Image: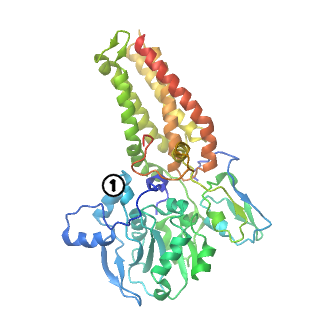
Amino acid sequence: MTGIRYLSNVVTLRLDETKCTGCGMCEMVCPHAVFRIEQHQARIADRDACMECGACARNCPAEAISVDAGVGCAVAIIKGALTGTSPDCACGGKSSCCG
Amino acid sequence: MDTNAKTAACCGKSDVSAKTTSQSPACDCHGEVDSRRHERGVETTGSVETPVAPVPRVGTVLGWADRLGTVKARWGIGRMDYRVEPGLYAVGGPTADSPVLVSANYKMSFDRLRSALPGVDAWILVLDTKGINVWCAAGKGTFGTDELVHRIEAARLPEIVSHRTVIVPQLGAPGVAAHEVRKRTGFRVVYGPVRAGDVPAFLQAGMKATPEMRRVEFPLRDRLAVVPVELVMGAKCVLLTMAALLVLSGLGPDGYAASRILARGLPSAALLLGAFVAGTVFGPLLLPWLPGRALSAKGTWIGLAMVAGLGAYMLTESPATPDWLAWSAWAILLPATTSFILMNFTGATTYTSLSGVRREMRVAVPIQAIAAVAGVLLWIVARFV
């Protein structure tokens, strides 16, 4: 990151090290280098860099990773709250704060 | 592909119809060339013979129409309908041994990829992502395991290539389970680099990405690329609020006077517009240096700078009778506005998490709401004093 960090101690990322086979997929797909493989075992090296995109959990063949994946977008959260749906990334051309 | 694209193209309205239009938003005045472009949403230059069917070939040099299309999409013009037809394409002269690169049918994603491939012989398998870029479509699941499996089968890829590997952009990983694709099709998913520009180096290195190729950053260039579309999307809201301020500014102790709209309303509308433009432009520009981690906190500083500037201006303009009541109203409204604007920029960044945004909103939104009410009340009171 170009020195930009987001909030600390907030993300839902969890790694069950007993299930991990050390295949390295999580390290490969993570865009923020959250994981590191050490001695054939994945380890969360930088949890606060996680943006909860869900790539690691989706690609873990051992299902050792869990995260409440979603889009970190205030507009989507506001819209979700107003319409009673879950936050969906849906900021198309027609949608602004005034609809 | 577009790393900055959470807003730059994220985000298709989910109800956008599934039609994969072959319409290009580009100018229509080019007879023959354009009729070919219109078939697939991209200009094709002949085709490559395969055992299955001829595969349309696309160039690796973007034309003026492609570039204009990019600029228009950046400004939100036709952005939700900027698509190429899903399916298999060729660049160069690919054979059965050539690599297969997977992409999205947002035309900017497709153009980024093909324009990175001069001198490369490859297949491009375009998934139907409803005109959304790779990363956002992966988050929604439209760039996903099912669609990839479907496109591999629909293109009859096993009959066209002799190997069993597809290169999926790394930012497609939130939607694609590599192990499931292998189970269902026999094709191994290799995750390529984040940026299309790194694909040639990735191929040259035997499909190995350096750690840098796997990292998403948020450099100045990417931050500024999303500014136009943010301006366009917020404009309607701001113009409506400006109109409301102009109408309200006619109010005064002696009833309604249209003359006050010019004298007091215009400066108010201008301040709101200034806050919108400053927040939308300087927020992304100064993002790494604005104090605080929450974007709502970072945004506050831009408004505070404006408050200081406004105070200084009022002291020089009318040193004897500065209107401190009006200034107080803006001292509350400006930071609240820029805080809200930058909080809404979270969707365009490449690093904010859903849990994090929820946490900052729990604090920021009540403060912004109270500030808005208090500020507007003060502003109205100032009309009567």
Chain of the residue on which disc 1 is drawn: B
Badge 1 crowding class, 10 Å Cα cut-off, few under 14, some 14 to 19, many 20 or more, is some
Q: Is residue B366 left or right of residue B250?
A: right
Quadrant of image for the C terminus of chain A: top left
Way the structure is coloured: rainbow
Residue at 40%, 15% (x, y): give it. B383
Residue type at mark 1?
Lys
Q: Is residue B64 left or right of residue B80?
A: left
What is the residue that sits farthest to the bottom in this orientation? B51
Q: Nearer the viewer, residue A63 or B188?
A: A63
What is the residue that sits farthest to the front in this orientation? A84
Quadrant in which residue A32 is drawn = bottom right
| x and y percentages locating residue B173 in the rendered image | 58, 66
Residue at 51%, 37% (x, y): give it. B340
| x and y percentages locating residue B230 in the rendered image | 42, 46
| x and y percentages locating residue B256 in the rendered image | 33, 15
Count the numbered circles shown.
Answer: 1
Check disc 1 and report the residue beneath it: B72
| Vertical side of B88 occupied by A8: above or below | above
Q: Nearer the viewer, residue B112 or A96?
A: A96
| Vertical side of B335 occupied by B128: above or below | below
Quadrant in which residue A33 is drawn = bottom right
Q: Is residue B35 left or right of residue B300?
A: left
Per the image, label 1 sits on a secondary structure element best described as helix
| x and y percentages locating residue A43 in the rendered image | 74, 62
Residue at 66%, 64% (x, y): give it. A57
